[in-house]
Image (cartoon, rainbow, N blue to C red):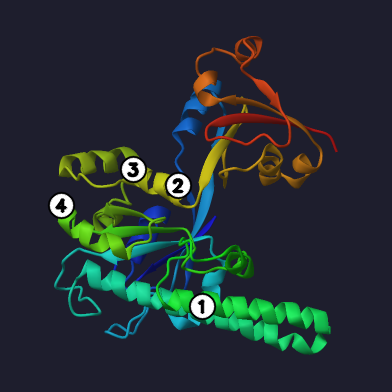
Amino acid sequence: MNFLIMGLPKSGKSALFNTLTKSARQDIYPDVRVGTVKVPDKNLDQVSKWHETEKIVNGEIDITDPATNLNFDASSDFIEKKYLQEIQKYDGVILVIRSFKNDSVPHPYGKVGLENDLEQFTIESRLIDVQIIEKRIENIEKSFKSLSKQEREVNEKNIQTLKEVSKLIEQGEPYSSEIYTQAHKAAIGSSFLLSKSPMMVIINTDENQSIPQSELDKIKPLIRKDSLLIQMPLGFEEDLITLNDHDAEEFRNASEIDLNDFDSFFKNLLKVSNSICFLTAGKKECRSWIIKEGSSAVEAAGKIHSDIARGFVRAEVINIENLLKFRTEKEAKDKGLIKGEGKSYIIKSGDVVNFLFSV
């Protein structure tokens, strides 16, 4: 999975990236930065201890931090227009909204305000989606000369449907609304739109700040119903990146910070993107794999290697909760809890899977 970090200048985008990737802090980041982050998985930790495995491999996600926006004023964008084409390659968005107060770090709009920032993002995201659709229509129109009359009629109908979608977005209709017909969704297909992209919103707080529920209630209508919101003191977390995990946890406990941590960050990121982790496990290696919820056994096999999917015979499956009740796999198998499943079996979170294949 590939996520784009979005937010106004000085909102904490780079602090999030640095914390996740253990990167050094700088004043300005002139280039786009891409990092690969290991996703913590308690099931993987448990199964690796059970197997006393030699090697542990976590699932991974890619995150992108755009270059620093140097237009630091009221004209600042959440995403610069030069990245309009680039953002369409991402699987989801992590939106960082500033809540922390620091006079030495001015806000582009002159004042820190969650409601105002989210309103501006909503307006900007609609404009971005409209531009993406307009570009799509333009590309379809360019192909008209080489098409037959019948193909042209199909594309004309498609253009009309895309214009309807564009108008609905401009009017502020959420993509999850029932007003979008199957024809609308078919016309958009797999195209990236901010309106339908998985999104997690992080409110970047001061170290000991917790947003009151009354303020959260005010901004709730500005956040898509299918998005998730968490609060994190990203500046504080960035300060801890030079410490090992044990010392960093002790420092958090001593500071009595009662906000979301990075375990909840990854848990929510998987949830908002409709993803789960399954496991492959043995003495030599235990590995966690990230797949879309609802994926079949053969699709999960393809995540590991196309040959395994192509030569799929069956999947031997046991959920980790059942596996941990036994001392050996043989005991679990004798009790009938390691089951042979076919291609259409739907993989569940925490499934430990051994794929049998022949090529």
Q: Is the residue under label 3 in contact with that under label 2 (CB below 8 Å)? A: no
Q: CA distance from mark 3 to mark 4?
A: 22 Å
The answer to whether residue 28 is visible is no
Residue 82 to residue 334: above or below: below
Q: Which residue is mark 3?
A: 244
The residue type indicated by label 2 comes to Lys
Q: CA distance from mark 4 to mark 2?
A: 27 Å
Q: Which residue is mark 4?
A: 208
Which circle marks residue 354 in the picture? none
The residue type indicated by label 4 comes to Asn
Which marked residue is nearer to the observer: mark 1 or mark 2? 1
Looking at the image, which residue is at 56% across and 44% down? 293
Q: CA distance from mark 1 to mark 4?
A: 42 Å
Which circle marks residue 166 in the picture? 1
Q: Secondary structure at mark 4?
A: loop
Which marked residue is nearer to the observer: mark 2 or mark 3? 2
The residue type indicated by label 3 comes to Asn
Describe residue 227's horizontal placement relative to residue 36 as left or right.
Answer: left
* Marked residue nearer the N-terminal end (1 or 2): 1
Describe residue 171's horizontal placement relative to residue 83 as left or right.
Answer: left
Q: Which residue is mark 2?
A: 271
Disc 4 packing (10 Å; few <14; some 14–19; many ≥20): some
